[in-house]
Each structure stands twice: as structure tokens, then as C-alpha cells.
Amino acid sequence: MLNKNIKVRFAATSSNQTFIDQHFGSADLFHICETDGKKVEFIETRSISKYCEGKNNCSDKKDKIDLLVEAVKDCSAVICVRCGYNPKKVLNQHNIYIIC
């Protein structure tokens, strides 16, 4: 359990703000939330450019992943259904962890 004075911010990929149901690369929104370990509070929704542009076409372009990192730089984690190796590696380098 978290200290009640500490809140953790995370981003979630969801098509409906209810279920974690999107692959990291397919998401065009991050739903930002905070938790104190007991309750979760919705903060905002952030629009992003999809990392993947098709089923077999995910970009390894540095500028694209840099924009995604920028979108969640205030978060400790991103919660999603799946995430590829490269985005996971880059986010981890920024102390942002992927939870799938």
C-alpha cells in the first residue's frame, strides 16, 4: 500500500475509459489517472499520434517515440494490453514502466 500522502500518476490505453483494451502502438489517446493506493482519480485525456500505422507497420522513428515519451513524462507507468520491445525499452530508460 502506498503512503497516503504519495500519489502515483499513470497513463492507460483504453477505447472507452473503462477497460484497458488497447495495444500501446494502436492507442491514439492516453487516459491519465492518479492513485494513492486506495482510489483512482481520472485527471485528463491526452491525444497522441499512434506509434503503429498498421498491423505490421510500427515505427522505430526516434521523433515518434520521443513525442510519446513527452506525453507521459509525468507518469510512472503506462498500462496497456501489449507493447513492443522498442517502446518498452525507451520508456524504461525514462523511468516509465509498461504494465501489460
Image (cartoon, rainbow, N blue to C red):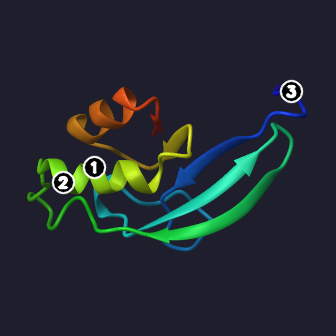
Q: Amino acid at mark 2?
A: Asp
Q: Position of residue 13 (x, y in %)?
A: 48, 59
Camera-near label (3 vs 2) is 2
Q: Is residue 49 left or right of residue 73?
A: left
Nearer-N-terminus badge (3/2): 3
Distance of label 1 from label 3 (alpha carbons): 31 Å
The residue lying at 53 percent from left, 55 percent from top is 12
Q: Position of residue 56 (x, y in %)?
A: 9, 57
Packing grade of label 1 (10 A; few <14, some 14-19, many >=20) is few
Quadrant for the C terminus in the image: top left
The residue that label 2 is drawn on is: 63
User: Residue 94's mark?
Assistant: none
Distance of label 3 from label 2 (alpha carbons): 36 Å
Packing grade of label 3 (10 A; few <14, some 14-19, many >=20) is few
Q: Is residue 12 left or right of residue 70?
A: right
The residue that label 3 is drawn on is: 3
